[in-house]
Amino acid sequence: MAEKALDQLEKLRKRLDEINLEILELLSERGRIAQEIGKIKEKAGINRFDPVRERKMLDVLAEKNKGPFDNKTIQHIFKEIFKAHLELQEDDSRKALLVSRKRQKEDTVLKIKDVQIGGGDPVLIAGPCSVESYEQVKAVALNHKRQGLKLLRGGAFKPRTSPYDFQGLGIEGLKILRQIADEFDLVVISEIVKPEDIELATQYVDVIQIGARNMQNFELLKAAGSVDHPILLKRGLSATIQEFMYAAEYIMSRGNTKVMLCERGIRTFEKATRNTLDISAIPLLKQETHLPVLADVTHATGRLDLLLPTAKAALAAGADGVMVEVHPDPAVALSDANQQMNLGQFNDFYAELKASGLLSRQSKVSVS
Ligand code: PEP
Ligand code: MN
């Protein structure tokens, strides 16, 4: 290339570099203004996305466009700019969510009696799918005592897919759980399905569970938010991470900060397992929120042979605990008969999980 052409090329490139910086400066300025607009809109309760205004801006740009880019290209570029700026505003609002890690850097640690959930050693929550009788729960509780376990689950109100299936013992079931908890010094967890039962449940259970089918039962979430009692919120069958976080936000926004999240598998096309355990949800929720994150591997897989590997995977991914179902005689269980471990299988499962070292995080010595 001739010297003159090279010289010219150099000059033009220099000018392009300058323009890039000018565009960057303008984009940043635009971004800051968009953030301010976002805040004003949030205060006024106005929707951030304004398609009418966006259409007007695109029309003005097309009108003023003198080339060399055609209108379609210009509009495409600006549409991307608008999108990025809208996302900036959304980021800002996520920052404001009470469940968000941006709002609270430290892990939320729930202290329930002498059990700690979150921030320390992972816990194991186990128990029958449904509370069926005092004797049935007692058999599991006795085994818990022998195994040194503290957290006992059991459903008293069962939201079943079929209306003809066992619906649970209701309040009787909660009373059985309380009696067992007091006799064996255990922490009991049970699902509540109606807003009006939340207050009552605080007398009987140590942790109130909100099940997958009720994750977006907003009145139930609001009721759970208005008591000062630990809540275990399960992910909805087809809920996105964002919907899950908003569900937890419903509880927290009413003043109850004692919330833990539970990944329990989501619905996918896969039929080999009951649901698909979304392992990536665990580190993602740990990153995005400060709440304890648990994994229910029984409802996620519905398969006894997958409980141990999925529990290990969940703990390796950072879960603060694992939930499983165990029944003294699964063959006669009134719900989820096929997916519950018997006591022997459960003890083997627990022994192997302990042996993996994944249940003790605090005591782990870091090797550099
Ligand atoms: C349960 O834990 O008893 C239960 C019904 O689970 P999920 O709501 O996750 O289906
Ligand atoms: Mn079950």
Image: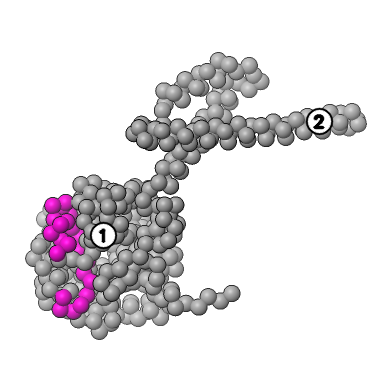
Query: Where, quadrant-wise, is the N terminus in this rendering?
Result: top right
Say what secondary structure mark 1 lies in: strand
- Checking the image for residue 169, the label placed there is none
Q: Based on the displayed image, in which of its 4 quarters is residue 13 positioned?
A: top right
> Which one is in front, 174 or 126?
174
> Which one is in front, 33 or 74?
33
Q: Is residue 202 magenta?
A: yes
Q: Is residue 67 visible?
A: yes
Looking at the rendering, the stretch of residues picked out in magenta corresponds to 182-203
Looking at the image, the residue that sits furthest to the bottom is: 146
The reply, left or right, for residue 75 in relation to residue 298 is right
Residue for badge 1: 231
Residue for badge 2: 11
Q: Is residue 297 visible?
A: no
Colouring scheme, one of rainbow, by chain, secondary structure, one colour: one colour
User: Which residue: 36% across, 51% down?
Assistant: 98
User: Which residue: 55% across, 32% down?
Assistant: 30
**Compared to 345, does 302 lie above or below?**
above
Q: Based on the displayed image, in which of its 4 quarters is residue 352 positioned?
A: bottom left
Looking at the image, the residue that sits furthest to the left is: 172
Residue type indicated by callout 1: Ile
The reply, left or right, for residue 90 in relation to residue 265 is right
Q: How far, Cα to Cα, is label 2 from label 1?
A: 65 Å
Residue type indicated by callout 2: Lys
User: Which residue: 27% across, 69% down?
Assistant: 112
User: Which residue: 44% across, 65% down?
Assistant: 317
- Other-residue count near label 2 (Cα within 10 Å), few / some / many at <14 / 14–19 / ≥20: few
- Other-residue count near label 1 (Cα within 10 Å), few / some / many at <14 / 14–19 / ≥20: many
Residue 219: percent from left, percent from top: 20, 47
Residue 278: percent from left, percent from top: 39, 57
Q: Earlier in the sequence, mark 2 or mark 1?
A: 2
Say what secondary structure mark 2 lies in: helix
